[in-house]
Amino acid sequence: VGVLLGLEGEATDAEVVRAVLAGDVERYAVLVRRYRDRYARYASRMLGSRDVAEDAVQDALVRAFDRLADCREPDKFAGWLFLILRNRCFAEKRRRQRQERPLDSTDELFAAPDRPDGVYEQLERARALERALLHLTPEQREVFVLKHTEGLAYEEIAGVTGATVASLKMRMHRAYDRLRELMKEHL
Amino acid sequence: MTAGYHLLVKRLLDGELTLAELPPELRAEGEEALGLVGAADRAPVALSPALEERVMATVRRHAASSQAASLGNRAWRWLNTPRDVQVRLRVRPWTVWAGVLAAAAALALLLGRPTPQAVPGAQARGGVRDSVLVRFVLYAPGAHRVAVAGTFNQWDRGAAPLVPAGRSGVWTTTLALPVGQHQYAFVVDGARWVADPGAPAVDDGFGRRNSIVAVTAQGARL
């Protein structure tokens, strides 16, 4: 058991992927533990709900397992998984639009009990921003989340989304203008 | 309608400029814009601890169903693959049980090999590398029980019973035998040891004859 635990901590994504493809299904838990929370914030901000985000992350991890043989570069599993989750988030947005169920349950995102007192104004502004983000196009919201929540540079965002830096900047600049309009009561 | 941010303010938000680099008349707008993006919540989001088990329970089910589907497909392909089956029966009088057993015949069939192998008494169709399926057939009209015992089942007379094919007097069973040479004999009604007259035999040292089947990765030969 000790050896196995050691392997889990040190195994690269590629090693784990190959082990799973060779039939060791239980090793997939290593990747689940490794990435379940890494993309949770992205999904939460994209979908506006932690519960919906949890479903999306769960679905993405299961879909990644089902299609693991298609992961041609196992050492880039993380980016591959992100694309699956990203597609899932965009599909969720389209599905809710068809059902006319807006993504507007953002309050739960800020209900963490460990937030210090005296930040009410900041909290209100953050809630307003989250609500405003839901009024952006999914592409605008994504570039805002990846840059200002996840802290990625434009070049990194281009790397994970496949868009060009120029088009990403254009989306972002339109998002800035739209957010200014939506947030005017809180600025 | 609120006007959009100045391009230089957008570059400030993009991190390409600092507030001090903005013209003085844009600094207030720049501070407002920084306040906007500064409201972005960067706190980690913790998902349910149960998520991992839910994912693993699902992938285990998917893996099991995928494996079952794969086995099913292979079995379906095997069942739909045309193959020749040769059955040869020999009838001989048995000296001790004359009038009870008219004859015994044995046939070993090897299943699954792409090309048939012309071996007297057997049709070899190889498949698995470390074991092959060998079909045993005995013609024993009037018998109540028939089994095959040999080196592959420690001569256990109850380990490999044959099944009667209707009322024809033909008894059959198919066993997966490991590659190698095996000695065997049929056991009729739990007591009578009957050598396969269609197969080579050796003396077992106790006055009886044991039949021999050689199993290779390419097939089985009598």
Image (spheres, grey):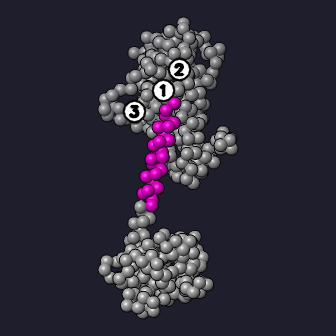
The kind of residue on which mark 2 rests is Asp
Say which residue label 1 marks: A45
Q: Which chain carries label 1?
A: A
The kind of residue on which mark 3 rests is Lys
Tag count: 3
The residue depicted at 37 percent of the width and 77 percent of the height is B144
Q: Residue A125 in the image: x percent, y percent?
A: 48, 13
The residue depicted at 39 percent of the width and 70 percent of the height is B79
The residue depicted at 45 percent of the width and 84 percent of the height is B106
Say which residue label 2 marks: B41
Tell whether label 1 touches label 2 (CB within 8 Å). Answer: yes
Q: Do labels 3 and 2 share a chain?
A: no
Q: Are marks 1 and 3 on the same chain?
A: yes
> Reading the chain from its start, which is encountered first: label 1 or label 3?
1
Count neighbours of disc 1 (C-alpha within 10 A) and say few if under 14, some if 14 to 19, many if 20 or more.
many
The residue depicted at 49 percent of the width and 34 percent of the height is B51
Q: Residue B88 in the image: x percent, y percent?
A: 42, 87
Please tell me in which quadrant of the rendered image residue B130 appears: bottom right
Nearest the viewer among B210 and A36 is: B210
Tell whether label 2 touches label 3 (CB within 8 Å). Answer: no
Q: Can residue A41 be seen in this view?
A: yes
Q: Are marks 2 and 1 on the same chain?
A: no
Report the span colored magenta: B49-71
Q: Residue A133 in the image: x percent, y percent?
A: 45, 23
Q: Mark 2 lies on which chain?
A: B
Nearest the viewer among A28 and A173 is: A28
Distance between the alpha carbons at the discs numbered 2 and 1: 9 Å
Count neighbours of disc 2 (C-alpha within 10 A) and say few if under 14, some if 14 to 19, many if 20 or more.
many
